[in-house]
Image (cartoon, helix red, strand yellow):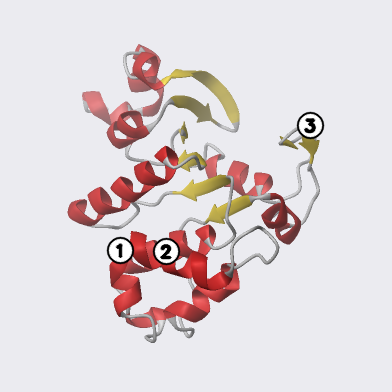
C-alpha cells in the first residue's frame, strides 16, 4: 500500500483522477503494468484492472445498493457479477442486509463502504482510494481501514490519499509527500514517520502555527 500525503491543494486528488483517466496529463507519461496509458478513458483503465473510489464517495443516491454495485461491474475480468457481489457483501455485511434499499438511505460510513464495494466490482489489481476517512466517525474509520488492510493482504495494490497522517503511516508501506503539485520527499512509511520535513511542511498546526 502506497500513501500520498500533503496539505490541501497539493494535487493529491488530481493525481488519482489523472491515473484513472478522468483528467488528461499535460506532460509526462503514465505506465500501468508496463503499458503506456496516458490519455486512456476511465472505462479503458477499469478494463485494464484499475479501480477508483473517489473523494466524497459519489454513490448513485437514487439507485439501490445492488444497482450501485452493477454500475461498477466490469465484464470479462474473471469473476461473475454474483460472485463479486457476494464477496463485497462478505466484506461489508451491512450492505448485504440492506441491498434493496437506495443509497440515499445509508449513513456516510455505509456509503463509503458502498463506494469501495463498487470499485471492487471491477476486480481491480490496483485500487485508488481518495480520502476514505473523510467526514466519518472514528469507529467507522477503524472499520473501513480494517477492510482496506484485508484487501492489501489479499494481493490488491492500493494507492491511498489520506489527510489523517497518523493513520496513513500506520497502514502504508511507502509514502509520497506532495506540496503544490511537486514531490517533496518519499520513502518507507517507518522512515518517513520520523522525517522532520513531514511536521515542518505538512503539519504546520502541530506546533501551533
Going by the image, does 116 lie left or right of 40?
Answer: left
Residue 96, placed above or below residue 118? below
Residue at (44%, 42%) from the top-left corner? 154
Going by the image, does 140 lie left or right of 106?
Answer: left
Instruction: Give the residue furthest to the left.
Output: 139
Which of the two discs, 2 and 3, labels the residue nearer the N terminus?
A: 3
In space, the residues marked 2 and 3 are separated at their CA atoms by: 36 Å
User: How packed is label 2: few (under 14 Cα within 10 Å), some, or many (20 or more)?
Assistant: many
Which label lies toward us, 1 or 3?
Answer: 1
Going by the image, does 124 lie left or right of 116?
Answer: right
Q: Which residue, given by chain and number where applicable, does mark 3 sit on?
A: 28
Q: State whether residue 60 appears in this view.
A: no
Going by the image, does 183 lie left or right of 203?
Answer: right
Kind of element beneath mark 3? loop
**Image coordinates for residue 177, horizontal then vertical, percent:** 48, 26
User: How packed is label 3: few (under 14 Cα within 10 Å), some, or many (20 or more)?
Assistant: few
Residue at (31%, 57%) from the top-left corner? 135
Residue 99, placed above or below residue 173? below
In space, the residues marked 1 and 3 are separated at their CA atoms by: 36 Å
In space, the residues marked 1 and 2 are separated at their CA atoms by: 15 Å
Instruction: Compare residues 64 and 194 and report the one nearer the observer.
Output: 64
**Image coordinates for residue 66, horizontal then vertical, percent:** 47, 79
Residue at (65%, 65%) from the top-left corner? 74
Instruction: Compare residues 20 and 28 and report the one nearer the observer.
Output: 20
Residue at (59%, 60%) from the top-left corner? 122
Which of the two discs, 1 and 3, labels the residue nearer the N terminus?
A: 3
Amino acid at each position: 500500500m502506497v500513501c500520498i500525503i500533503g496539505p490541501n491543494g497539493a494535487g493529491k486528488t488530481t493525481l488519482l483522477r489523472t491515473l484513472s483517466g478522468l483528467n488528461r496529463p499535460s506532460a509526462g507519461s503514465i505506465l500501468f503494468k508496463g503499458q503506456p496509458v496516458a490519455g486512456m478513458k476511465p472505462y479503458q483503465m477499469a478494463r485494464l484492472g484499475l479501480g477508483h473510489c473517489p473523494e466524497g464517495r459519489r454513490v448513485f443516491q437514487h439507485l439501490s445498493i445492488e444497482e450501485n454495485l452493477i454500475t461498477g461491474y466490469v465484464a470479462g475480468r474473471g469473476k461473475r457479477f454474483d460472485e463479486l457481489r457476494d464477496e463485497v457483501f462478505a466484506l461489508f455485511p451491512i450492505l448485504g442486509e440492506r441491498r434493496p434499499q437506495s443509497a440515499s438511505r445509508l449513513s456516510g460510513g455505509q456509503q463509503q463502504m458502498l463506494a469501495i464495494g463498487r470499485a471492487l466490482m471491477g476486480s481491480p489489481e490496483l485500487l485508488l482510494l481518495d480520502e476514505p476517512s473523510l467526514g466519518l466517525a472514528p469507529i467507522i474509520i477503524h472499520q473501513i481501514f480494517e477492510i482496506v488492510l484485508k484487501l492489501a493482504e489479499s494481493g490488491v495494490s492500493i494507492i491511498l490519499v489520506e489527510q489523517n497522517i497518523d493513520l496513513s503511516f500506520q497502514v502504508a508501506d511507502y509514502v509520497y509527500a506532495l506540496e503544490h503539485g511537486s514531490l517533496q520527499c518519499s520513502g518507507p512509511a517507518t522512515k518517513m514517520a520520523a522525517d522532520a520535513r513531514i511536521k515542518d511542511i505538512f503539519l504546520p498546526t502541530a506546533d501551533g502555527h
